[in-house]
Image (cartoon, coloured by chain):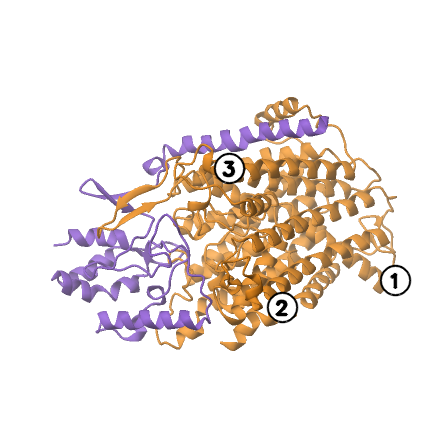
Amino acid sequence: MNTELLGVIGIFILTIVLAIPLGKYIAKVFLGDKTLLDPIFNPIEKFIFKISGINPAEEMNWKQHLKALLSINLVWFFLCFFVLLFQGSLPLNPDNNPSMTPDLAFNTAISFLVNCNLQHYSGESGVSYLSQIVLMFLQFVSAGIGMAAAAMIFTAMKERTTEKLGNFYDYFIKSCTRILLPLSAIVAVALVFSGTPMTFEGKDAITTLQGDHVEVSRGPAAAFIAIKHIGTNGGGFFGANSAHPLENPTYFTNQVELWAQMIIPFAMIFALGFYLNKRKLSNIIFGVMTVGFLLLVVPTVMSEINGNPAIEKMGIAQATGAMEGKEVRFGPAISGFWSIATTVISTGSVNSMHDSSMPMSGTMQLLSMMVNAFYGGCGVGILNYYIFIILAVFISGLMVGRTPEFLGKKIEAREVKIAAFIAILHPLLILAGTALASYFAAHDTAMGYWFNGNATGWLNNPGNHGFSEMLYEYTSSAANNGSGFEGLGDNNPFWNITTGIVLLLSRFIPIIGPLAIAGLLAGKKYIPESAGTLKTDTSIFGIMTFAVIAIIAALSFFPALALGPLAEYFGM
Amino acid sequence: MKNLFSIIKLTAVTLILFAVIYPLAIYGIAQLAPNQGKGETISVNGKVVGYQKIGQKFDKSNYFWGRPSAVDYNAAGSAGSNKGPSNPDYLALVQKRIDTLLLVHPYLKKSDIPSDMVTASGSGLDPNISPQGALIQVKRIAKERKLDEAKVKSLVESKINTAVVGPETVNVLELNVALDQLR
């Protein structure tokens, strides 16, 4: 047990330590400074831009950034949608898996496009190898989009007045080639040598030791799993995601995959400090996020180690903790830690089944996605936190009677309106979606059209836990997370379409908002710091931001949590 | 329009880099990995009997059993049970598994049974059980196979994988392959 806790603490500290130099490197990449990898990537990028006819030196304003970002996403959506829709007749399909239904293809294409990877199919039977590779392409570029958006915001925070905020394509390509690609390659190699398959051969039919016939699914998994974590996408190659023994074969690969999903979100915070030369600001932000993260981790790990109280009553030994939905090679401590890392960071990959977690862990997993501002996904994590900074600046400015300013720019009505809208959108999408689904689940005859004549056939568990399954699905969609209480029967038009819409809104509006605020602020007059300035790189301001985040989350979500996992917790 | 054309060309070029060159490079490296990246297998007398990492069903009484599986160890369709911790049907199922274990191993006390032997794994393909999960079966196996109990016990102990960090595990397939060779 003690070495299990050691594994948790060790990987967390190691990731922080390595995130600092990586943050410095990321800052250099976005600043265009010299790095060690220049000789490799300069010619590759030059070639890419030459073929595409794009001038990477052409500076854009924030609206041009947005236009480029949205149009390239539209192209990718259609590419992926049609591949999934016709995968059954396309090459690289050794297992003869069928084409997707239009609603499932819609949901899957969007969910990989928006870096969420909600999967309403199982990898073994739901997609061809060609589709897996196209989805893997989206895992790269959707992470690159998030980082490019963050890079634009970094540029806009500089102490100057300008409309010119760098080139979107330049940030995007550099994020993909110089950051995501090398890290993914390292992780993929570690996985391949630990037993994860990387083959284009189909299922293998074998006779087991006691004489049963089974088929074993394989595939080009290692390359996929690496970028799934490095890009905080989280979509599994196999149905059971990183609980699958080929997707995550050993305790060592488990640590590698944990590291891989945490490293860029951590490093992006430090990158902000290096980029603006404001180390203190980024340290405060990282500190606030870490406090929030640990507050979520500790109860989860503890309740998983303690095991299921209902099974305790049956009188058996729970020395290895709560084991339903968990793998023996990982154990409860690191599984509990992973479940919070993956929900806080918006990866959404799982190494244990969250549906079977203890109620307290379920509460914390939901809360991680409801808050959606600690560390966060690849690039977009810092965007979410940025919104709360704007709100905190505004509120504390009012409290002490000073003009709200952030990094020398006045925050005015327009920016605050945008920030407030973004902050409210997240609970709105979650609660409205859950309310709608609960209505249909409660009146199941009216929903016959949607699901085998029986809407409550959606739910895998009765009572409060069943409600939690629906709440989790929308929370995961709105946080672009992608994990699930997977007992929910979600491959049907109702869930495919409603979560697809939530995914789209909750990806692009929270990118558009911060980009607009940053763009507007960048165009304003720079006011040098004076005695009257509200300091934003102090721990007092850190606490203020934390309070804003906590109050918004508590007010919006407490009633829903009380109906779901909290009720289950107190009922056990 | 010119922009759209640029975007399509950019997509094509990045597709080649990330969806062709990157996976092929990893595929190339995988040729150096165990079993050329096709998954490590275990053979007995030259015949493949299973994948080292993938759990398989053992329900015959002369073999060590693995954990319950929500997919009955179907290695072409992994999944957990996704049962919530307070679900009454689920708890009744766990109780039934405990009763079955006690019935087949009449020498056991309830508190000897580790939770991994009565709960389904996340993947349904867990290749491992806890050392305690194997040790409670020793007496039954020894009786079934007419082997010395101490010998079977020391076989189990030799198959416990310990690591610097992380839980102790026993790979059920490896244990059973070794058991077949035990005289």
When the figure is inspected, residue A279 is found, relative to residue A297, above or below; the finding is: above
The image quadrant where one finds the N terminus of chain A is: bottom left
Can the viewer see residue A271? yes
State the CA–CA distance, disc 2 to disc 1. 36 Å
A185, B104: nearer the viewer: B104
Q: Position of residue A551 (x, y in %)?
A: 71, 66
- Chain painted purple: B
Q: Position of residue A366 (x, y in %)?
A: 58, 62
Specify which label sits upstream in the sequence, 2 or 1.
Answer: 1
For residue A386, side relative to residue A237 (left or right): right
What shade has chain A been given?
orange
- The chain ID associated with circle 1 is A
Residue annotated with mark 2: A560
A120, A399: nearer the viewer: A120
Q: Have a look at marks 2 and 1 and say if they share a chain.
A: yes
- The total number of labels drawn is 3
Q: Secondary structure at mark 2?
A: helix
